[in-house]
Image: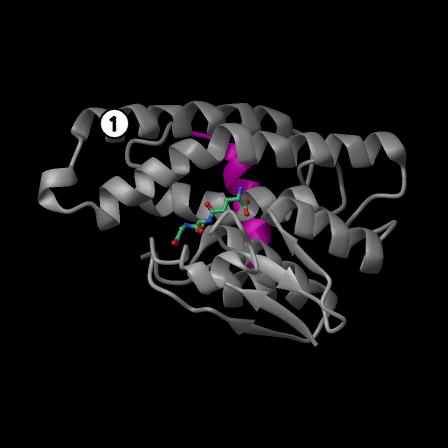
Amino acid sequence: MLEIYGRASSSNVQKVLWLCEELGLPYCTAHDVPPGKAGTDDYKRVNPTGKIPTLVEPDGFTLWESNAILRYLGAKHASGTLWPGDLRVRADADRWMDWQACTIAPAATTVLYQTLRAKPEEKNPAALAAACQASRDAAGLLDAQLKGKAYIVGDAFTLADIALGQWVWRYVNLVEQRPAQPYLMAWYARLQDRPAYKKIVMTKLV
Ligand SMILES: N[C@@H](CCC(=O)N[C@@H](CS)C(=O)NCC(=O)O)C(=O)O
């Protein structure tokens, strides 16, 4: 059975759990620590970055970085479907996954932290406002990409939808004054039809 280290409320852990659910891969979870507490010395022996998730396979093969885990499991179990067989379609999905990690994640982390976790002395309204605006701008870009498509890189659901789908739940629930983004919202509605999305992602944000 696959072992997935990390708490189920973490956005990056949810990507991996969601993929396992989509593929029917048996898994168990471990190291369910509170936010900000993943980096213990014990855990760093498994993942030196001190971040979650980490995947450990039954033979001990260990991999961290959520999108790398998605690509690995996708190549192993969903080649030609969730991880597209066509090189250019796959590169397109890959590109949106990198964009999620590089552009969306920093803003999303600030929005979540400032909205739900910051102690009064840590509150930074300017940082929150900037991260909300960065999120609205990124959502606008994704909305344009989704025009005329059911999913991010075409008619089929891929790993790119998983990497970004966890975020849209957070965007809708935490960012106020969102502009009209009809293609993004139609995609979000499609994701909500997926049992694995409901089970893993549509949960209480903490
Ligand atoms: N680029 C990494 C980021 C991992 C990351 O920042 N994970 C957060 C949770 S979403 C974390 O470990 N935070 C520290 C903690 O919770 O102790 C990935 O995609 O796996």
From the viewer's perspective, tell me whether residue 124 is left or right of residue 92. Answer: left
In the rendered image, is residue 35 in sight?
yes
Tell me which corner region of the image, top left, top right, bottom left or bottom right, holds residue 155. top right
Q: Nearer the viewer, residue 150 or 31?
A: 31
Q: Nearer the viewer, residue 73 or 188?
A: 73
Please determine whether, in this image, residue 26 is positioned above or below residue 34. Answer: below
- Residue lying at the far left of the rendered structure: 120
Q: How is the image coloured?
A: one colour
**Residue 75 appears at what percent x and percent y?**
82, 51
Please determine whether, in this image, residue 79 is positioned above or below residue 61. Answer: above
Q: Nearer the viewer, residue 145 or 104?
A: 104
Please identify the dominant SS of the magenta region. helix
Q: Which residues are magenta?
A: 180-194
The residue beneath circle 1 is 127
Tell me which corner region of the image, top left, top right, bottom left or bottom right, holds residue 160. top right
**Residue 191 appears at what percent x and percent y?**
58, 52
Q: Is residue 184 magenta?
A: yes
The structure residue drawn at horizontal position 42% and vertical position 61%, both measured from the top left corner, is: 9
Please determine whether, in this image, residue 155 is positioned above or below residue 30. Answer: above
Q: Nearer the viewer, residue 62 or 158?
A: 62
From the viewer's perspective, tell me whether residue 141 is left or right of residue 115. Answer: right
From the viewer's perspective, tell me whether residue 52 is left or right of residue 81. Answer: left
The structure residue drawn at horizontal position 70% and vertical position 77%, both measured from the top left corner, is: 1
Q: Is residue 147 magenta?
A: no
In the rendered image, is residue 153 in sight?
no
Amino acid marked by disc 1: Ala
**Residue 154 appears at what percent x and percent y?**
75, 37
From the viewer's perspective, tell me whether residue 15 is left or right of residue 19. Answer: left
The structure residue drawn at horizontal position 38% and vertical position 65%, both measured from the top left corner, is: 33
The structure residue drawn at horizontal position 33% and vertical position 28%, both measured from the top left corner, is: 131
Q: Quadrant of the C terminus?
A: bottom left
